[in-house]
Image (spheres, rainbow, N blue to C red):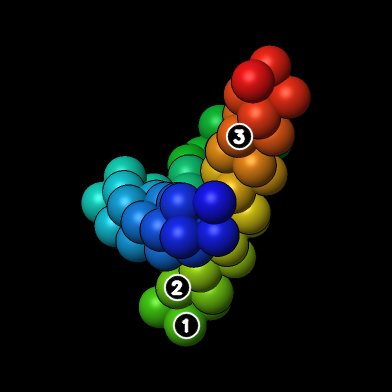
Amino acid sequence: MEKILVKTGIYSFIVFFFLLVIFMKREESTTDFWGMTSFVVTPYPDFFFHIFRYSIITSIIAVILVCAYLLSNKKKE
C-alpha cells in the first residue's frame, strides 16, 4: 500500500508540474475603466513557485484519494 501511495504522489506531482508548465499562462490581461487593455507578466521565479505549489497541492489530493480508495476496498474484503 505504501508503494502505491508513494508512486501516486511522485507521478502525480511530475505530471501536474509539466501540465501546468505547458498550460498555465504567465501573462494576464487587465482592462481599466476606459477600456484600455494592458498585460501583466509574472516573473519566472514567481511563476515556477506557483506551479510548484499547485503541483504539491494536487499530488496531496491525489494521494488522499488513492488512500481513501484503497482503504474502502480493504474494508470490503
| Residue designated by label 3 | 70
Q: Amino acid at mark 3?
A: Leu
Please give left or right for residue 4 compared with residue 62 in the image.
Answer: left
- The residue lying furthest to the bottom in this view is 45
Residue drawn at (51%, 40%) of the image: 36
Q: Are marks 2 and 1 in contact (CB under 8 Å)?
A: yes
- Distance (Cα) linking label 2 and label 3: 32 Å
Q: Residue furthest top?
A: 76
Residue 8 visible from this viewpoint: yes
Location of residue 34 in the rendering, given as x and y in whole percent from the top left corner: 62, 34
**Residue 13: percent from the left, percent from the top?**
44, 59
Q: Are marks 2 and 3 in contact (CB under 8 Å)?
A: no
Q: Earlier in the sequence, mark 3 or mark 1?
A: 1
| Rendered residue at 55%/59% (across/down) | 2
Depth check: 36 or 64 in front? 64
Task: Using the image as rendered, state which of residue 45 and residue 62 is in the foreground.
Answer: 62
At a point 45% along the width and 73% down the height, the residue shown is: 48
- Residue tagged 2: 48
User: As drawn, which residue projects farthest toward the front?
Assistant: 77
Q: Nearer the viewer, mark 2 or mark 3?
A: 3
Quickly name the residue at label 1. Answer: 45
Which is nearer the eye, 72 or 41?
Answer: 72
- Tell me the element at label 2: helix
Three-letter residue code for mark 1: Pro
Left or right side of 59 for 76: right
